[in-house]
Image (spheres, rainbow, N blue to C red):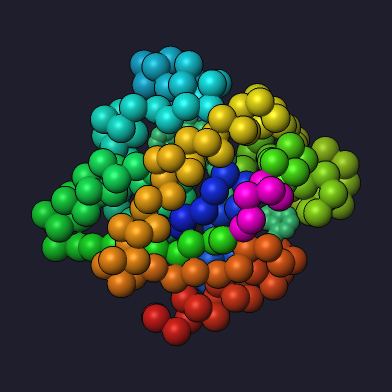
Amino acid sequence: MYLVLLGAPGAGKGTQASAIVAKWGWVHVASGDLLRNEVAKGTELGIKAKTYMEKGALVPDALVIEMILKRLVNPDTLKGVMLDGFPRTLTQAEALDKALTEQNKKIDWALYINVPAEILVTRISGRWICSQCQTPYHAVSAPPKTAGICDKCGGKLYQRSDDTEATVRERLKVYFAQTSPLLDYYRKKRNLIEVNGDQDIGKVTEDVIEELGKVQ
Ligand code: ADP
Ligand code: ADP
Ligand code: ZN
């Protein structure tokens, strides 16, 4: 099973990812997490990616495609893969399809978490992330039990340096210009599933599991 999670920044992709992969035993491959890891380690890719990420721009396709295709040859992906944050451009979607076709595989479903644009800034500006397991929290809608500490692993929570209002607005512009066309790309292939992401976190999870359950 190859599943792509689609939705604007702040739609709740990372939040829903853990419940989905826990239910079906897939691996969660999040391009943003992989890139932040490269930046933290100071690798050649990390140094190149950082300048784009800080501005809220997309990292060039060639760099991200190479990083993801390398990740997808890891044997843990045999269990099934949930891609989060990739593809983000038509070029990336086509490169992914091409690489999978060569291995007799394909994207089975694209799951779109639909959230009205006006609430995305509030979601992202209140976001806190676990420095160890990357679980997202929210100051108001999803606070941790103990302030500043991850419920799941005890890791310290931090705010991403690109989750400022100016950068978020830029990322949303980029999303509507470059990523939202992917909805039609997958719709035309008849493998787009849509859920309403503007509900309580638990209700969104229920809807996601119900919709994916229908196609298992
Ligand atoms: P994405 O991975 O799509 O960028 P996240 O999963 O990180 O989004 O969620 C963005 C922020 O919104 C986080 O702070 C998260 O706790 C919060 N959030 C996620 N889903 C919901 C929801 N259904 N209702 C309210 N807040 C949510
Ligand atoms: P969010 O879901 O909150 O937008 P991500 O963690 O997915 O954030 O991505 C953070 C940043 O990493 C993006 O703003 C972009 O600079 C870079 N990035 C992540 N995935 C991709 C991708 N597939 N293509 C290009 N850049 C990416
Ligand atoms: Zn954690």
Percent x, y for residue 174? 48, 35
Q: Is 125 left, or right, of 100 in this rendering?
A: right
Residue placed farthest to the left in the image? 102
Percent x, y for residue 208? 55, 72
- Residue at the (83%, 44%) spot, across then down: 139
Q: Is residue 212 above or below residue 119?
A: below
Q: Is 4 left, or right, of 73 in this rendering?
A: right
Q: Main secondary structure of the magenta part?
A: helix
Percent x, y for residue 62? 26, 30
**Label total for image:** 0
**Nearer-the-camera pick, 106 or 94:** 94
Residue placed farthest to the right in the image? 146
Quadrant location of the C terminus?
bottom left
- Residue at the (69%, 28%) spot, across then down: 164
The picture quadrant where one finds residue 92 is top left
* Magenta region: 115-120
- Res 184 visible: yes
Quadrant location of the N terminus?
bottom left
- Residue at the (70%, 41%) spot, across then down: 121
